[in-house]
Image: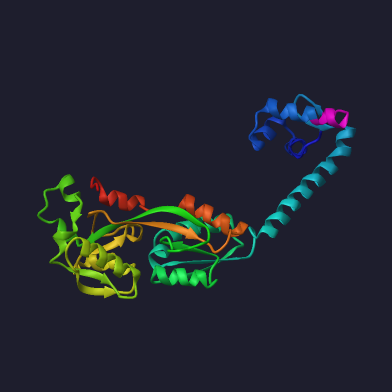
Amino acid sequence: MTTLRQLEYLVTVVDTGSFTRAAELLHVTQPALSHQVRALERSVGGTLLERLPRAVRLTPMGRAVLPHARAALADAERLRTAARLAAGLDCGELELATVYSVSLGILPPVLRAWRREHPQVRIRLREYAHNDELRAAMAAGQADVAVGTPPPDWEGPIRELGVEEFVLALPAEDAEGGEGGEADRRAVPLAELAERPWVHYAPGNGLAELVDGVCAEAGFRPRAAVRTEQTAAAPLLAAAGLGPALVPANIVPPGFDGLVRRPEPPVRRPLVAYTRTRPDPLTAAFVDLLARQACLLPPHVSALLGASRD
């Protein structure tokens, strides 16, 4: 039985003029390539290639078969293209919703990888300050997929992405007077920061509730030196000396000139991708890529944390 793979091998040998070069191009061994070409010849009932000392030449039967081999391969490629277009993997638009911290942290490298794989698919990004707003928007049909914390009482599919870690961003001068080495990289008990003014988030930002909650568990209410609506501004304001900030680890920028420390107790939250119904092929492809590519603790932040442990 003739296969598309055998036809591809025949065409590649003819185009390169060599079994050796064809095998390299197809990433197979030369014996395996020769075996498949002989199998094709048995299938069609005659010799297709004349193997000369320094070249390969088509036989009359080979010249008759070659146009049909090329046509079969072209038809197969058109079939694959039509299937991908019907599934929306090579065109169309994906509506993505998330919260500010996720769009700043894990999404940029994922969207870069998606763009490489699906350059014709447009992304429409909707950002929200609070996970409750994100859930409401998703429930109202304003996006194909949402990325955030697990939505309460959600009846649609949910895909776990991992656990997002929070770190403390501090001014560089906090290291002055330290003991050096691992002692300077220890986890910082939140209670030690009770008397400090904090870089806090504006009330509409969902991270404001998170900071208030973890500080309350540590026995104090954080006093705000400044409140910011821009999540990305928090670590920068902390590095500028306005006070400590509790931030998602994945929003700390490369080249950050402040200190990064783990809080004690550790602060983490799960992240998921969720849809209203079973995702279509385009959405499913994006969620699969997100699950593979999402980096919840970037290497440059891990290096800043150094020897510190939970």
Residue at screen point 81% across, 41% down = 69
Residue 295 appearing in the image: no
Give the colour scheme of this rendering.
rainbow
Horizontally, is 4 left or right of 137 in the view? right
How many dots with numbers? Answer: 0
- Residue at point 31% right, 49% down? 302
Q: Quadrant of the N terminus?
A: top right
Q: Position of residue 259 (x, y in %)?
A: 22, 57
| Residue pictured at 71% horizontal, 51% vertical | 80
| Residue situated in front as seen by the camera: 57 or 260 | 260
Residue 24 can be seen, yes or no: yes
Q: Residue 116 versus residue 201: which sits nearer the camera?
A: 201
Q: Residue 21 at x, y = what percent?
A: 68, 33
Please report the residue visible at 11 percent of the width from the left and 48 percent of the height from the top: 179
Q: Is residue 63 left or right of residue 264?
A: right
Note whether 230 is above or below 121 in the view shown: below
Residue 236 magenta: no
Q: Is residue 55 left or right of residue 271?
A: right
Magenta stretch, residue numbers = 40-49
User: Is 52 on the left-hand or right-hand side of 88?
Assistant: right
Image-quadrant location for residue 248: bottom left
Residue 103, percent from left and from top: 43, 64
Residue 199: image quadrant is bottom left
Q: Is residue 249 shown above or below 71?
A: below
